[in-house]
Image (cartoon, rainbow, N blue to C red):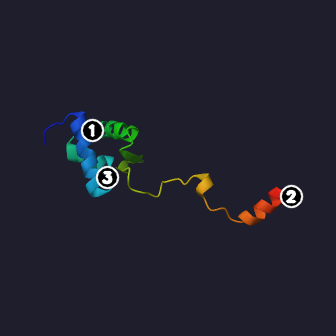
């Protein structure tokens, strides 16, 4: 594979992630024949643009839900909410 510019490589990374779901940094580095640090920089740029989500050792498309999603506190189910409201009223 010929060496690509960063922008071209990032576009292809987005295509690979949309096709494969998630990929590890090492897989991407091997695919593009570049260093893992180069891929990490590309992933950081894509993450800052909101195109992907980074996780330790890899990335996945931003549109995909994953186990690392954190639900907002206001959206979490609250156990014993009726009892808590009674305490607040007192």
Where's residue 73, x and y in %? 61, 53
SS category of the residue bearing label 1: loop
Q: Residues within 10 Å of mark 3 (few under 14, many from 20)?
A: some
SS category of the residue bearing label 2: loop
Q: Residue furthest right?
A: 90
Q: Which image quarter holds the N terminus?
A: top left
Picture residue at 40% right of the left edge, 38% below the top: 48
Pointer 2 or 3: first along the chain: 3
Where's residue 43, x and y in %? 34, 41
Residue holding disc 1: 35
Picture residue at 26% right of the left edge, 56% below the top: 19
Eye-nearest disc, 2 or 3: 2
SS category of the residue bearing label 3: strand
Residue 23's tag is 3
Picture residue at 27% right of the left edge, 50% below the top: 27
Q: Residues within 10 Å of mark 2 (few under 14, many from 20)?
A: few
- Disc 1 and disc 2: Cα gap in Å? 62 Å
- Disc 2 and disc 3: Cα gap in Å? 53 Å
Eye-nearest disc, 3 or 1: 3
Q: Quadrant of residue 83?
A: bottom right
- Disc 3 and disc 1: Cα gap in Å? 15 Å
Pointer 1 or 2: first along the chain: 1
Pointer 3 or 1: first along the chain: 3
Residue holding disc 2: 90
């Amino acid at each position: 594979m010929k060496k690509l510019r960063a922008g071209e490589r990032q576009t292809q990374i987005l295509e690979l992630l949309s096709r494969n779901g998630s990929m590890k940094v090492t897989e991407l580095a091997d695919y593009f024949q570049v260093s893992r640090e180069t891929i990490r920089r590309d992933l950081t740029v894509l993450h800052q643009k909101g195109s992907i989500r980074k996780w330790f050792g890899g990335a996945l498309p931003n549109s995909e839900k994953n186990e690392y999603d954190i639900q907002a506190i206001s959206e979490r189910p609250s156990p014993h909410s009726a009892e808590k409201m009674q305490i607040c009223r007192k």
